[in-house]
Image (spheres, rainbow, N blue to C red):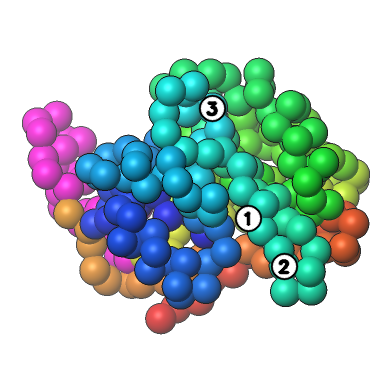
Amino acid sequence: MNGENIADGAGITGKLADKLLASGADVVTLGNHTYRRPGIGEYLATSDVVIRPANAGAWTPGHGLAVVEARNGVSVAVLNLLGSLFLEVPRSPWEVVDELVDEARRRAPVVVVDFHAEATSEKVAMARWLDGRVTAVVGTHTHVQTSDARVLPGGTAAITDAGMTGPHDSVIGVKAELAIRRMRTRLPVRFEPAEGGVRIEGVVVDCSDDGRASGIEALRIDV
Ligand SMILES: [Fe+2]
């Protein structure tokens, strides 16, 4: 699960991360809002399963790779990376991804990459670059589920954006009138999370124990 905006729409707290884990998430990934909430750095420094982007900088607390066990005993590695187009990143994901994928594959046959990035082109390019080396490249950050869930020729499942679990009667989760006011007036407006149209969105990836994907389905569930 990507949990970077679980704390009222911006960031995450240790308490909320624990809640996500207790609700059934095996690994929680984050993104560009990782360090918005006080105390989260200390939490991430000691957590093996709540991870921040691996290219978030050498001195930021936390880990960028988690390895957990699936219900059938197969090891699953989860990698979190930030895109470099239109986002500020201390290191380009392209500089670090190959080494990280090698490390993940040494530790687990199934490798899932959460590529938290703004540009569709960068997310499509990363999926193509990793095709055949990882099980899935799942895009996050843009909140709008894309219609390109597919398995690439090398056996890597990919989607540009898994979508958003949250209030869809909104501007990507924010009360629409506040987001529009900030855009129109260019004045500072305090964002508040919206409430209506709550949907669960995500993807289900089918794969074999050797990590090769055979299917991917985008999910959209009204609640
Ligand atoms: Fe984000």
Residue type for callout 2:
Ala
Q: Which residue is at 59% across, 69% downward? A: 219
Identify which amino acid the numbered label 3 is placed on.
Asn
Q: Tell whether 119 sits left or right of 148.
A: left
Question: Between tags 3 and 2, which lies in front?
Answer: 2
Give the residues drawn in magenta, as a range: 167-191
- Give how far apart the Cα atoms at labels 3 and 1 are: 27 Å
The mark lying in front, picked from 2 and 1, is 2
Query: How many C-alpha atoms fall within 10 Å of the one at disc 3: few (<14), some, or many (≥20)?
Result: many
The residue singled out by tag 1 in the image is 147
- Residue 182 is situated, as x and y percent measured from the top left of the image, at 16, 38
Residue 50 can be seen, yes or no: yes
Q: What SS does tag 1 mark?
A: loop
Q: Earlier in the sequence, mark 3 or mark 2?
A: 3
Residue 55's tag is: 3
Residue type indicated by callout 1: Ser
Residue tagged 2: 70
**Magenta stretch encompasses residue 175:** yes
Q: Is residue 172 one of those drawn in magenta?
A: yes
Beta carbon at label 2 within 8 Å of ligand 1: no
Closest to the observer: 116 or 175? 116
